[in-house]
């Protein structure tokens, strides 16, 4: 089923089309999002870290992507990129017109899609042709040629089911570790997690970091932050201290510290940066 979100703000327009992947991809691919936008001026956004690995297929003009203070990475039209797990926000900029598809993988799904661990992709953005060779070029061309969003999402289902079935499996202990940490929204203690899968804490940290790209404790911080972001966006917050407690932060000060780290702002400033109807977070 497709879900549409649209905003008209003066001279600006953006439309997002969301779809759930096929049931065979559950736990591996989180969602699809097709998007079209036209804005009166270049659009800058902050892309926040979350418990997933985004892949963008760019069907419109070039996109600039950069970590704060870093040199921008430009993705041309008819290309794409995949971003590993990040522990800070990224800055994107478009020229005012944009069209493309975003695929959000779980880290388990991303490792299967690439058929390798994600350590080398931590805090990195890599173009699809570098990652996948001719398969990356073919995917972009097929999505661009598809007549509509439903056809694009069906094509992705077909391709991803085949590719993930052919991949080397992720160790069951690591699947359980990720799933448990995610299910707890980052509140599960790392020692308890290691005990549950029968590994030492040191061994878990090493294997988890090698497989997914970030250590489990830092990943837990990102998952707590992501839960706080979702509650803020849903308008389900009565007080900052209550939000900190609900999301498993030690206290309000620790929550504010993590917002500075992961969003570059306080929670209140983050709310003020929200663009309507799923438009993202203003980077201006």
Image (cartoon, rainbow, N blue to C red):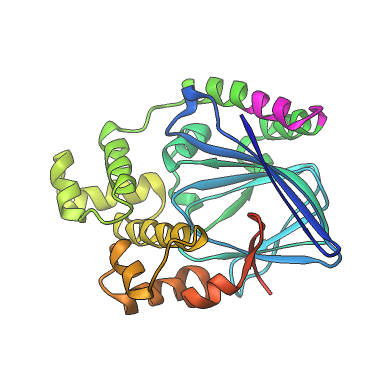
Screen quadrant of the N terminus:
top right
Q: Nearer the viewer, residue 231 or 216?
A: 231
Farthest-out residue, front: 238
Instruction: Say which quarter of the image contains residue 238.
Output: bottom left
Residue placed at 46% from the left, 41% from the top?
106
Q: Position of residue 246 (x, y in %)?
A: 31, 62
How many numbered callouts? 0
Residue placed at 48% from the left, 24% from the top?
23
Q: Nearer the viewer, residue 219 or 40?
A: 40
Residue placed at 55% from the left, 56% from the top?
124
Q: Position of residue 258 (x, y in %)?
A: 40, 71
Q: Is residue 118 above or below residue 226?
A: above
Query: Which residues fall within the magenta stretch?
Result: 145-156
Residue 173 belongs to the span the image colors magenta: no
Q: Position of residue 192 (x, y in %)?
A: 15, 50
Residue 152 belongs to the span the image colors magenta: yes
Screen quadrant of the C terminus:
bottom right
Q: Position of residue 137 (x, y in %)?
A: 73, 34
> Horizontal placement of 17 versus 121: left or right?
right
Q: Is residue 149 above or below residue 69?
A: above
Instruction: Say which quarter of the image contains residue 173.
Output: top left
Most frequent secondary structure within the magenta stretch = helix
């Amino acid at each position: 089923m497709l879900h549409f979100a649209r905003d008209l703000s003066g001279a600006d327009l953006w439309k997002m089309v969301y779809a759930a992947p096929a049931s065979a991809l559950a736990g591996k691919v989180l969602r699809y999002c097709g998007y079209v936008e036209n804005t009166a001026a270049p659009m800058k956004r902050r892309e926040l870290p979350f418990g997933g690995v985004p892949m963008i297929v760019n069907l419109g003009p070039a996109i600039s992507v950069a970590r704060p203070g870093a040199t921008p990475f430009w993705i041309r039209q008819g290309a794409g990129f995949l971003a590993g797990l990040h522990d800070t926000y990224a800055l994107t900029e478009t020229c005012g017109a944009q069209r493309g598809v975003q695929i959000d993988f779980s880290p388990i799904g991303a490792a299967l899609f690439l058929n390798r661990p994600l350590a080398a992709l931590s805090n990195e953005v890599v173009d699809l042709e570098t990652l996948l060779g001719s398969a990356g070029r073919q995917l972009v061309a097929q999505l661009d040629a598809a007549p509509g969003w439903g056809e694009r999402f069906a094509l992705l289902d077909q391709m991803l089911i085949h590719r993930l079935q052919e991949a080397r499996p992720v160790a069951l202990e690591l699947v359980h570790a990720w799933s448990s940490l995610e299910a707890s929204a980052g509140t599960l203690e790392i020692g308890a997690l290691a005990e549950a899968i029968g590994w030492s804490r040191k061994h878990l940290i090493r294997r988890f970091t090698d497989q997914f790209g970030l250590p489990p404790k830092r990943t837990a911080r990102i998952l707590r932050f992501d839960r706080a972001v979702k509650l803020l966006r849903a308008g389900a917050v009565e007080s900052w201290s209550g939000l900190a407690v609900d999301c498993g932060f030690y206290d309000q000060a620790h929550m504010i510290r993590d917002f500075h780290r992961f969003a570059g702002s306080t929670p209140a400033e983050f709310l003020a940066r929200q663009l309507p109807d799923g438009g993202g977070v203003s980077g201006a």
